[in-house]
Amino acid sequence: MRYGAWRAGATMARFRLRRYLIGGSFWALNHCLPLVTGLLLKAVFDRVSGVRPAYATGLALLAALVAAEVGRGAVLWSALAYWPGWLQPLAARIRANLLEAVLRAPGPLAGRLPASAGDAVARFRDDVEDLLWFVDGWVDVAGAVVLTAVALAVMLSISPPVTVAAVVPLVGVLAGTRALGRLVRRAHGRMREQGSSVTDLIADLFAGVLTLKTAGAEERAVERFRARNATRRQAAVRAQLVRNLMSSLSGGAAQVTTGLVLLLAAAAMRDGRFTVGDLALFSAYAASLTNLPRWLGSTLVRQREAGVALGRLARLHPEGRLERVLSPGPFADQPPAGRLRALEVRGLTARHGGSDAGIVDVDLTVPAGALTVVTGPVGSGKSTLVRAVLGLIPVEAGGVWWNGAPVPDPGSFLVPPRVAYAGQVARLFSATVEENLRLGWPAGEEELWAALRLAQLDEDVAAMPLGLATVVGPRGSRLSGGQLQRAAVARALVRAPELLVLDDVSSALDQRTEERLWRALADAGITCLAASHRPAALDHADHVVVLDGGRVVRDRVAG
Amino acid sequence: MKPPKRPHAPARLRRSPWLLVATQVGAERGRLVPLAAALVLSTLLPLVGPRLTAEFVDRATGGAPLDALLGLGAAYLAVAVAGQVAGIAATTAASGAAWRTTNRLREQVAGHAMRLDMGFHGRHTPGEMIERVDGDLLGLTQFISGFVARALSSVLLLAGTLVLVWRVDWRVGGLLAALVALGATVLITAQRRVVPYASAIREETAQMFGAVEERLAAAEEVRANGAARHAVRRFHEAAERVWSADVRFQVRGGAVLAGTNLLFAVGTAVLLGVGILLRQWGVISVGTIVLLFQYAQMVRSPVEDIVGQAKELHEAGAAATRVAALLAERPAVVWRAEPVSLPATGALSLRFAGVTFAYPGDPPVLDGVDLELAAGRTLGVVGRTGSGKTTLARLALRLYDPTAGRVLLGGVDLRDAGREDLRHRARMVTQEVHLFAASVRDNVTLFDERADDAAVERALESVGLLRWLRALPDGLDTRLGAGGTGLSAGEAQLVALARVFLADPGLVVLDEASSRLDAATEMAVRAATARLLAGRTAIVIAHRLATLVGVDEVAVVEAGRIVEHGPRSALVRDDASRFARLLEGVG
């Protein structure tokens, strides 16, 4: 059954139901308090026009008016200050669950994430925001419903026929909002298209500016630019017009209501059946009544956007189980480590978009304590093999055997402390060296330095101003390509894995460092599966597997 | 060779950037009248409403005939609707005026920027130019339309309200004015206090999502290193910081909002009180109290709008300054007002007389170059990267002026020539061919509306692309570039040659294309080039020595000087010549 926006919203509201209800009450109260002001205004004006018997002095009434406003202010402030207590933890929970699902759920990672990390963050940020915005609006609708109900009740008790005057424009607003809503969306879309068209032209003209200059075509190009600007202007002004119509609906509705009230109440006012105070009340309520149609329209828009957001978020979560987004999924925990005797790959076939054509029917054994190097020309499938073994990309056929037992889901099984990995592109995070190495792994400082020594990075870190506490990564100190690669290797080594998997980790290193790295890895007796074409790696390898066109063409054990 | 990037001092502004904007707005003159009318109406009409209700109240309580009351009610409705219509008209017209104004500025900026030297374009990517030509101006567009629609109309509305209230009773008028002043002051100071807390939320949120992006970009490493739990934990910590920042902001921002509400509400209550007193003293009627009450409620929005616009003024000012700074940059090459004409037809002779050229602050790229090329002859220029070959080409087309010496085309010093004339009689085929996202016609004529299709087809035929053209779905109208029909590297080069064919210049500078072509395409391009260069003076900047087979003369450039120049055949036969030695080196 489809997990629609309403069900998702209900689950979200239930997340911290008490806070939602308390905060919602504040907001609903905030919506409704103008009712009190209206009644007080009625009292004031009745007193002033001497129509009603004076049941309170004018001063007292004004004081009550001020007190009501103070109360309104207090309620609004409370609502604003309290609300983050519901909204923020919910937002954090959803995003954390999504993050955990992306990073830990079973199955291959590739294909789950959208094309760029930037797109993925947009999902995290904007799509979750759309979901929250939807549920956020419910309390306002509730408040507006209560407001409208009470207001109409009060107005009916004063004069039913005049109340009709108030209701008619509202229906108009609701209908108008729906109709205009579609127009607004279309006009807005068109304006954005035209905007892109203009910026594309600018980029094009300036990319080809040399061509234009040498042909003296600058003015002609500007003429084209002018034409496109004109089209864009029309689209923008049209969008503005439609938006103005939309906001005019609610703005005008209150005034139209007042006008209709004047017309319908004229006779009654002459006869004294409808007082000045009543007029003041109806006028004040007229503005409040436009809230409900506006909030209803807005909620429908948000519901549509939330539905779209849910669809996009579902693609991030494995099996598209979105209910799990709102409550943490029971992902497999750290597996207990056992000594590795051998890792076998049998008939592994995997194709993944990219420079590699893929691998076909690969058989290979990684014996314990040995350095196994997978090599071959560019595009032969070395990287694909390594990533397929680790379950990072979808596998078409074949599998991985750990100590003779088949591994059903390598992505969840082949993780620390069994396996650790350093990928082709070494990426560090904006954090201290220490944190980058640990990433939550309980390792002591001794173990960190041991890993750094093995990865040939200890001298570099010792030379850094704050050593292990130096902040590196995209927003920290820049490390050279070689330092990044060694850091990624050190990070994997910290986990003291049974099997170390490396993908092309020495391409940025100078010859001497590279030589030392591979020697250290070979001498340490670590079971290692490395994809590399570097001579230094091949020199120290105990076991070399050659790939070509995705197939194993040679498999030899070094003497 | 591209000019090296160096720090560039921006041109200083002598006048306020707002003058620039105002000039363009002034150009709107004719259209401003209906805009002004709509603006005035949209502020006057709302002011009429309370008068009508006041009148209505007094008459209704005074026992006026029903017709009169109904008339007033109808009038109120009419005025309300008319006010809304006028408001929509005013805002829409303001938007139109803003877009027209800024579009003119966009065109001015784009045209100006395109005419700047290649040095400028080397320093600024097309992406940056989008920001300068469109991004800054978008901000201005929004500001101008907002300024007119909201700030101006708010000022008018406020002024009108205060005047009308003052006319009713000076005491109430004074009170309302005080309320407005107080409200504005509170809003300005309070908003300024709150801004750092809003920034703090943005900062914490940016860090939180920044960390998420890093983890997602490295998702495979995170996963395969068991670091997912840690990533989630860190995320929770960052989210808590966002939560705290949000609460801190809401508490303060909420106080400002609630406080402002309270201020205006209390002010209105006080006004009411004064009104009641005046009624008791018999100065005003009940209807007038209703009037005053309604006017008091009408001052809050305008005050908020004006304060809001004042904030945007600052940002828009920064944008206007950037635009003005760009317009203040001057191209180094200045064309004579009364130029000397180049020979109108036929091949042109080219002469470099003692030409020295250096980019500002750099050592000379060309040093004392003397070169003479008779009309109709083809010269091949060879030399290592950085020897000055490309600079020769740029100087021949007056993309730069030499620091010393003269360049003469057809006997005319380029400094005396006219820009259009030169651009028509001397053309370059660039190293990288740029195809615009436009029709085939536009790509060959380079947006020239005057060229007729027959001429374009002849040009395409001359390069051997006629059959390709006939095979296209929309012929000359077929769109090229991203999203349109793709061209192979060879076809692109042929289009570049077709551009020059169409122009029929007397001098062609050919900067050899860098893309590698397969043998067949290479031959087609070579044939088309030979046809193009026939009967024209040409300079061929060769990056591959094989290109020089068809040239008449060869010049070898080394460290900014011509170290050898002579007929190609002679240099090839002379084993001692540098050219011959270069050829051997390759072979």
Image (tube, coloured by chain):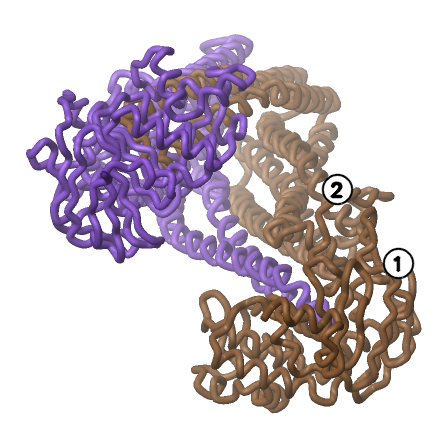
Chain colours: A purple, B brown
Query: In x, y percent, where is residue A358?
Result: 25, 53
Image quarter of the N terminus of chain B: bottom right
Query: In x, y percent, where is residue B560?
Result: 80, 60
Q: Earlier in the sequence, mark 1 or mark 2?
A: 2
* Circle 1 crowding by C-alpha within 10 Å: few under 14, some 14–19, many from 20: some
Q: Nearer the viewer, residue B263 or A157?
A: B263
Instruction: Please give the name of the residue rendered at 26% of the width and 30% of the height, measured from the top-left corner.
Output: A500
Residue matched to label 2: B7
Q: Secondary structure at mark 1?
A: loop
Image quarter of the C terminus of chain B: bottom right
Q: Of the residues tagged 1 and 2, which is closer to the observer?
A: 1
Residue A295 seen in the current view: no
Instruction: Please give the name of the residue rendered at 61% of the width and 78% of the height, measured from the top-left corner.
Output: B444
Residue A139 seen in the current view: yes
Q: Secondary structure at mark 2?
A: loop
Residue matched to label 1: B403
Q: Amino acid at mark 1?
A: Thr
Query: In x, y percent, where is residue B473?
Result: 43, 82
Left or right side of B211 for B449 = right
Which chain hosts label 1? B
Q: Amino acid at mark 2?
A: Pro
Left or right side of A4 for B508 = right
* Circle 2 crowding by C-alpha within 10 Å: few under 14, some 14–19, many from 20: few
